Amino acid sequence: MARGRFGLFPAVALVLLGTGCASLLDGMSAMAPPVDPQTLIGLAPQQISAVLGEPELQRQEPPAEVWQYRTEDCVFDLYLYREESDSRAVHYEARSRSNGTVDPAQCLGSVVARSPLAEAPSTTAPASL
């Protein structure tokens, strides 16, 4: 995968910022707008932390490292694999905390809604989606 070090980061940050800000108006994770988890694929750990914050749990499952984010309703796991000299996100899974099914995009939306990026004051209007 030959991408610039931060090639996708600005686009992902704008998408996540726009959806995160909109969900703050609702104040409920169930009402958070969905965010396509594919936007995280290929990102490096520092890029992921910048948009989602630090994971609640990090565990090693060689050859992967799993970053776990939790909300009241769901758990979002992001799998990072070492690629050359850096780790990159290559896979994700989402599951309900109550044995039901969950839409990965809705789960990620609720994670984004409670991320530090969503809580940061914005000096510009969020991007329209």
Image: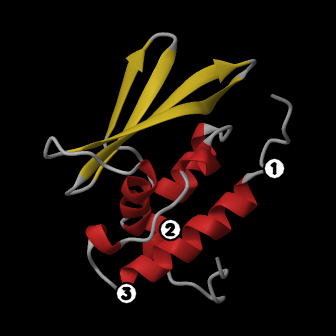
Nearer to me, 35 or 46? 35
* Total count of labels: 3
The amino acid pointed to by label 1 is Gly
| Residue holding disc 2 | 117
* Distance in Å between CA atoms under marks 1 and 3: 30 Å
Proximity of marks 1 and 2: CB atoms separated by less than 8 Å: no
Q: Position of residue 108 (x, y in %)?
A: 43, 54
Pointers 1 and 3 in contact (C-beta within 8 Å): no
Q: Amino acid at mark 3?
A: Leu
For image coordinates 20% across by 57% down, the residue present is 72
Quick one: label 1, few (<14), some, or many (20+) residues within 10 Å? few
* C-alpha gap between disc 1 and disc 2: 19 Å
Query: In which quadrant will I find the N terminus?
Result: top right
Question: Is disc 1 placed on a helix, strand or loop?
Answer: loop
* Residue 27: quarter of image: bottom left
**Residue 107 location in percent, x, y?**
37, 54
In-image side of 31 versus 90 (left or right)? left
Q: Report the residue marked by disc 3.
A: 25
Q: CA distance from mark 3 to mark 2?
A: 15 Å
Residue depicted at x 73% and y 21%: 85
Q: Which mark is residue 7?
A: 1
Q: Residue at x 54, y 28 (%)?
A: 80
Label 2: which secondary element: helix
Task: Check residue 75 in the rendering and tell me which mark sits there, or answer none.
Answer: none
